[in-house]
Amino acid sequence: MKIILLPGVDGTGILFEPFVNTFKADVPVEVMPLTEDSDQSILNQVSIIEQAVGDEEIILIVESYSGLLAYELAKRNKIRIKQIFFFGCFLQPPSFIGKIGRFLPVRLLNVIPDKLLSRILFNRWSSPELIALFHKAVASVDFPNLKKRLKTIATHQKPTQLIDVPCVYVQGTMDNLVSAYNLKAFEELCSSLQVEVVEATHMLLQTQPETMSQLIHKYLQL
């Protein structure tokens, strides 16, 4: 048994640092950055994850963009997934920002004023440490691949196949990037779904690592 964390659209896994430093489990916890392969299609990415996982049973903790990967992994049913925790995820273009994101110059991430960054991503939980962590992640981003993932977000069609893996969907009430309507797709497509609505921004695992750790442990049956 292993717990695997799949990151948001940056793909680096660096932003998991506050959560990983807080979360304690009796099984190994692995952050799995998204592949830097030039083929950023969802099918290629999930194939690489499947090869890496092999026959081991896993619990997936995924945020934002990687919800698309976790759903596909569950749908394909080629690996043993015990449970999926979706944090601020979506199965269709998540918001107006998500739809236009493919047209934005991704290198603007390097020049976003910290004050605006704090407001959008962290709100009242903002801190110099979180701002520095964001800049650290951006410095490690593969921008051509990020652009491809943003295109996937903007054009992804809502799937139709049910998945039966036990799932927990965690929604932040102050999420500026993923609109609340995204929960509906999970309610329709996950036959075994629990929903947690918490006062938080999109960056649930970064701003409230202890609270999210407790939430996850509430559902884990290890």
Image (tube, helix red, strand yellow):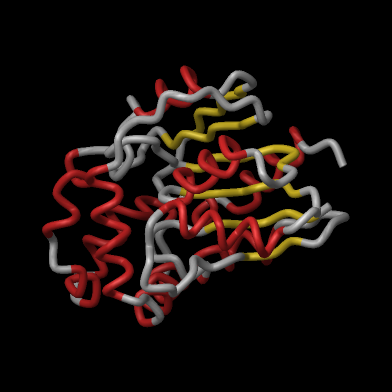
Front residue of this view, candidates 48 and 103: 48
Counting from the top left corner in percent of width and height, residue 187 is at 49, 19
Counting from the top left corner in percent of width and height, residue 44 is at 47, 59
| Rendered view: 113 above or below 136 | above
Counting from the top left corner in percent of width and height, residue 120 is at 28, 52
Left or right position of 17 against 222: left
| Rendered view: 189 above or below 20 | above
Choose top left, top right, bottom left or bottom right for residue 216.
top right
- Residue at 64%, 21% in the rendered image: 192
- Residue at 42%, 79% in the rendered image: 136
Counting from the top left corner in percent of width and height, residue 28 is at 80, 62
- Residue at 34%, 54% in the rendered image: 121
Left or right position of 45 against 98: right
Front residue of this view, candidates 55 and 68: 55
- Residue at 38%, 51% in the rendered image: 124
Left or right position of 212 against 29: left
Q: How many marks?
A: 0
**Which quadrant holds the C terminus?**
top right
Choose top left, top right, bottom left or bottom right for residue 142.
bottom left
Front residue of this view, candidates 51 and 60: 51
